Structure formats: structure tokens, C-alpha cells
Amino acid sequence: MSALTEQGERARVAARRLNTATSAEKDAALRAAADALVARTDEIVEANAGDLEQGRSENISEALLDRLSLDPARIGAIADGLRQVAALKDPVGEVLDGWTLANGIEIKKVRVPLGVIGIIYEARPNVTVDAAGLCLKSGNAVILRGSSVAHRSNTKLAEVLRDALEESGLPADCVQLVADTSRETATELMGMRGYIDVLIPRGGAGLISSVVENAKVPVIETGVGNCHVYVDAAADIDKALDIVVNAKTNRPSVCNAAESLLIHSAIAPDFLPRVGKLLADAGVELRADPASRKILAGAGIAVTPASDSDWGEEFLDLIMAVAIVDSLDNAIAHVNEWGSNHTEAILTEDLSSARRFCAEVDAAATVVNASTRFTDGGEFGFGAEIGISTQKLHARGPMALPELTSYKYMLWGDGQVRK
Amino acid sequence: MSALTEQGERARVAARRLNTATSAEKDAALRAAADALVARTDEIVEANAGDLEQGRSENISEALLDRLSLDPARIGAIADGLRQVAALKDPVGEVLDGWTLANGIEIKKVRVPLGVIGIIYEARPNVTVDAAGLCLKSGNAVILRGSSVAHRSNTKLAEVLRDALEESGLPADCVQLVADTSRETATELMGMRGYIDVLIPRGGAGLISSVVENAKVPVIETGVGNCHVYVDAAADIDKALDIVVNAKTNRPSVCNAAESLLIHSAIAPDFLPRVGKLLADAGVELRADPASRKILAGAGIAVTPASDSDWGEEFLDLIMAVAIVDSLDNAIAHVNEWGSNHTEAILTEDLSSARRFCAEVDAAATVVNASTRFTDGGEFGFGAEIGISTQKLHARGPMALPELTSYKYMLWGDGQVRK
């Protein structure tokens, strides 16, 4: 039995206990964990310093070092996150439906935990705590497989969580970190049928597609966002200028930022120079198709020719692909061909165009006259988010506590047999 | 581009059209298909005769020949099934949730089709029509990959459905049958990411596990049922006798039939000889652990020693594994170790035992004091069923129209940007 299978076995046992843990027990453990994170800040910062030192010696980027870094303020915020999760409604036990058969059998459809959740994630050590908190609240044991870059930090954070669980009377094995961060353990985790009920990869497109391609356990695909903003012929220009700039520049490194701008040919001569100037002033590199390039260049705005690969790219940076389309149909076709089924926006005052776009575009979220940046568990009011699903099975869009559950049917009879 | 990829491409195009088809359009097509099946009964019977002839020449079993066989009455029943599906409520467009953000953005969570569904199934040709009908009603295009045994029948049935679709103004490609029934096409179907949104295998345990192991597209695991009946110390003996016999013998070849009987040691000396006699009289072979064997043999009832593999076996036949357990805990542990997460029953008048069994047993359905045979879309009142899911992701238990859908979030704003 490999180290990982052993962890899987322990996770199953812990999941059985968690399955019937009360909300009060789980919330007490979450609050104890939050207190412990604050109380043990020094230990965490010290472990993190080791990761940072190694990161610097390996010349990882400043951006990555920043995402890796933990200080007392960040640790306090992570602890507050756990307290917020404790304050959310427990999804487990919710009666989703119920009825009585003609023969008197009473049926209840009840929300239950999924069981054991595997999370494979990249640098940020806060994911260790955030994911563990959401899994615990929803009654699931979790096996966390973080990256080597953050391993000292993750190990310490997991230790603090496990200690707090134990002191609260729940099994420490509700939260387990995979000790070996080699590629092999990720692959092994993907194959652990019978131990892992669902695997959620959190990270870049490379990680997600590797998990989706190789996993034999059920996977929820998250987070790759090649989001489009389509500016229709009937768009309100002032609203559209605000929305396009916001969708691209508000936070370019996240999955709900816009990557592509489609503009109806009827409005392009007027709209494109104005939006192009605003984007260029905000430091955005424009990669444009021939028609839009002509207009942009004609207005004296710096522009790069778009290559075919730009249409499908999630830049996560101040880069935007720009194309002119000559109809709503072509806008929808372009989005459905190149989009990643995350968030797609149409800017228009024409009701029929808005309705068609929403109905025909295949995405977790369609947006009319607002920024793509609103597809987010926090903005939606979910209170927490484990990721944004871009698949259609099980959960779509921002995933919070209910999306980390399954259900079971409970039948209560008094001797019924089938004729 | 392979023949299958081409079918996948056509299915995607058809799915886009179906995605916005109205309920009236879909229901008209379903009723037209039902009429066409009846009108073209002779053609179908003739095609079926070819399959039966080949089946006989290959010496397939009488049971299989019976499942393969179509006559006017069966074709009429299949057509009626389509009419019943037409009469069901359309799941697409249901608003599952909705709210307004503080900034005024209105969010609706709306049920939408999954897109393209793949079905891999074994002998019964009625699945061709049943599955196509459910997929069509829920707005999904379907790619059907049946078995070679029924290929002539399936080809004719698909032709009738496609003609009816076309005459009703929907794309024929909403329903496609894979022409090549070799193992290779099944494997190819399992890998068609980007074409198939979910693959549902319908058939024996071998088929299901092959799909689950090899698929790269999302799968819904269905139908393997190693269901237990646990007779608690506090069971009502008369009810228990009825229920055990019904669960085992009412229809032994289906997934919700009971395969294993667990009996609390306190009640075994009284209960086991009585239930053993009833089961033996009904032709059931009992495969018993040492403790129950002693009691059964002592009462003069024929009994076979159980081997370890019997505990995990889905017999689908008049065979039942029997074991004595000395506590509720051990009953639950046995069920969770050997069950297939389908349907698990406890027979008891003790409320606390019933509640613990329902909470701690990991299955799509738990049953108190009734037959396992009630886990069924028809019995549940769903009006139709595409299969019974034994996994926890997306859908669990009997799957009907809503389980063949996903959802999307639609955001309606008037210029909102994110701060």
C-alpha cells in the first residue's frame, strides 16, 4: 500500500465520521482552526520564510514570490476566512425535495457530503486553508496536494489545522496534505478510484488540462477563462467604454477578466478608436484582426496583428484580442468556437439580441451590459468559493458549499413490497 | 477526421439548434416519432428478424433473444413511451434560483441542456428509442452506440426517429447511431472531449467499469446494484419476511433486486429458518456464512457456503448471500465495504437504528421497512428514467429529465463595473 493509498484509507475513515458531524461540531473546529492560525502566526511565518528563501535562490518571479508570501496580516485574513465559512449555512442535511408515494412510502431527497475531495493546486498557500475550510464545512475529508514551492508553508498550515481538528474532537485526518510533491503523486491521486470522490484542480490551464486528460476519478474542471465582451451594434457607447476597460484591466490576472473584444462592424468606426485609446492608455496591448487593425492604426493607436492562437488564449495579462464581426450570429459563433465556457458578455440595448446571446452562447455565465468580472462566488453572494467550474456536469460557474455536496434518497416505509 | 468525429461535429451543430428549440417543437417531434414507429412497424420487425436470425445462428441465449425481440405490441409500447415523455414537463428553462445584487445586477440560474450525450448500451433495442426520447425532450443531441447483436434493429429504429425529426423541422442529427459496433468505436467515443458532454454507459458491470476506467469525457456511472437487506434485532418479522422475499424474487435480473441478506444475531435463530424456507421454496440458492449456514442446515434448508467473492457479487439471479452480524455497526460496516452504493435497506421498528443506518450507509437510496425494488424512476414518479446513478457527482439514484440538464447563470445589468 503506497503512502497515498494509506492517506486515502484514512481520509475515508475520517469522511465517515464527518458525514454525521453536526454543524456545531464543524463550526467549532473551524473557529478553533482560525484561532490557532493567529496564535501560531510566528511558526507559520517562519516556515514561509523557508519557502521564500528557496524561491529566491531558484529565481522565481516577484509576482510568484508575492503570491507565496505570508505575513501576520495575511494570516489574519486567512483565519477570518475560516470564521466566515463557519458562519455560513451548513448545506448538509438540507431536504431538497420530498413526497409520498401512492403506497405510503415517504421519500426525502437529502443533501449529503461528497465524501473525500482531492485538491491539486499551485503556489498560493492560502488555498491550503481555504479549501480545507470549505471541505470541512460541507462534511468532506480533503486530501491536499500543493506545489513544492509552498511546501514548508503548506505543511505548517496543515499541521495547525490538524491540531485544531483534533482538539475539537474531529479526526485530524479530515485534512491531509500529500507529503511528496513530485509529479508522481499528482498522477497517483488522479487514479485513486474508491478513495477520492471528486478531484478539483486549481491552477493554470496546463494543470487543469493534465488532470482532465489523465484522471480516472471524477473531476470538476475549473477556472480557465477566455472571456469575451461583444459590443453589439445597439450598444450604449458610454456604458460599453466603461465595461470593456473594467473587464480587461480591473484585475487582468484572474479568470473572469476579459481576453477578447468583439465589435459589430456597424459601431466599430465610432467605438473602436475610443475604446482602443482607453485600453492603450491603461497599458493594454491590442492584438487585432485586419479590419480592426486598420481602424486602430488609422486612429494612431499602437496595435499588433492577431495570430490565430490569440483567439483561444487566456492571456491573464494586459493583452486583448480584438476582432470585428458583421453580425450577432458571427459574434455568437466566434464565442462558441473560441471561448472556454466561463463568462461571456454582450453590450447592447436591443432586447432581442441580448436574449439570443444569452440563450445561444454556451458558457457558465452570460452577462448583459455589465463587466465579466462579476462571475465570482463572493460577488454572487455565496460567501466563499472553491473555484469556478467551466464544465456542465455537477456544477457550473462559481462553486460554493452546496456544490461540494451530493444527495441521497431516503425511503421510509412500513412493510411495502413491489407488485 | 474519423467517421465518429464527423458525427460528433454534426451532433454539436444539432445540439445548438436543440438548445433553443421550444417545448412545443420537441414534443411534436416526439409524437411524430411515436406515430412513425407504429406506422413503420413492419420495417422494424423485418430488421429485427435479421438480428434474431443471426443471434440464433450464433447460439445466443433464449433470455438474450427475448430481450432482443421486437413485435408489434412491443413497438407499440415503445411508441407509447415516447408519448409519455412528450407529456412530461420540459426541464429546460426552469429558473432554479434568482436574486439581485446590491449593485442592481439581476442574476437568474436557469436549467439548460447538457449538449451532446453519448450512450453506450447493450442488447435491448428499445434503449435506442427510450434514450433518444429522453435526450431530445431535455434538449440534448445524442450519439448512440449499441451492440452488434441488435444492430439491424437499432439502425432501423434510428432511421425512423431521424426521419420523424426531419419532418418535424428539427435536425435529424439530434439522434445519431454509431454505424461501426466494434470495440474501437466505444473506445473512441470515450475520448471525444469537446464533442461529448457526458457519456452514460447502460449495461452490465463489465461495460460500466470499462467506461469508467477509460473515459476522458465526463461519465455517469449507472446501474450496478449489490443491494443489501439488513434485518435488525428489532425487525417486525412478518413485514421482514415479505420484504426480503420481494426484494430478492420480484425481479431478480434488475439492479434494485437484493443480493445480500444480513441478519442480526439476536433475531437469526427465529427469523433465518423462516425466511430461508420461503426463499428456498421460491428457488433461491442461499450462499451463507458459517453462522447462518449452521442455522439453515439445522432447519433442513439447502445451503451453499459463501465464498468471499459472494459478498461483492451482483448475481442478477435467484442467488442470495446470507450473513449474520452481531450489531448495527457491523451491518453498516459490511454494507459500506461490499455495497455498490445503489440501494440499501434496514428492516427495524427501532427509530434510532433506522436513523443511524440511513445516515451512515453510503448509497444512492436508503430504505426503511420496504423493498429495495422501489429505487426506480417509474416508482419514484419521475415518469421516465435513463438509468440509476451510483456515483455522487451530478446525479445520484434514478435519473430522469432534470438529471440530463446543466444550468447557466444569466446576469442582466445596465452598465455595472467592478470596483
Image (cartoon, coloured by chain):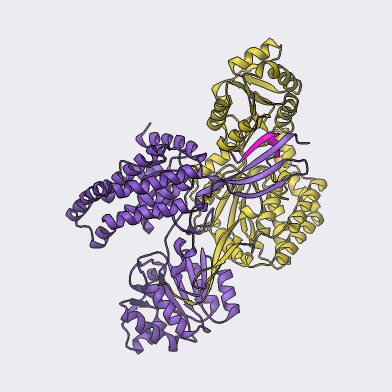
Chain colours: A purple, B yellow
Question: What x and y, as percent, mark residue B281?
Answer: 76, 20
Indicate whether A77 appears above or below B361: below
Residue A157 or residue B374, whichever sits in front = A157
- Specify start and end residues of the magenta stretch as a single range: B361-375
Q: Quadrant of the C terminus of chain B?
A: bottom left
Question: Is residue B149 or residue A73 the one in the foreground?
Answer: A73
**In the foreground, A328 or A157:** A157
Residue at the left extreme of this rendering: A57
> Is residue B374 located in the magenta-colored stretch of the structure?
yes
- Counting from the top left corner in percent of width and height, residue B65 is at 73, 37
Front residue (pair B135, B339): B339
Q: Is residue A285 above or below residue A116?
A: below
The answer to if A113 sits in the magenta stretch is no
Q: Is residue A63 above or below residue B363?
A: below
Q: How many discs mark residues in the rendered view? A: 0
Point 38% across, 65% down: residue: A254
Residue B45 in percent (x, y) is at 78, 48
Horizontally, is B93 left or right of A323 in the view? right
User: In the drawing, does residue A306 fall left or right of residue A40?
Assistant: right
Viewer can see residue A202: no
The residue at 74%/49% (across/down) is B47
Q: Position of residue A273 (x, y in %)?
A: 39, 86
Q: Is residue B289 visible?
A: yes
| B187 lies above or below B265 | below
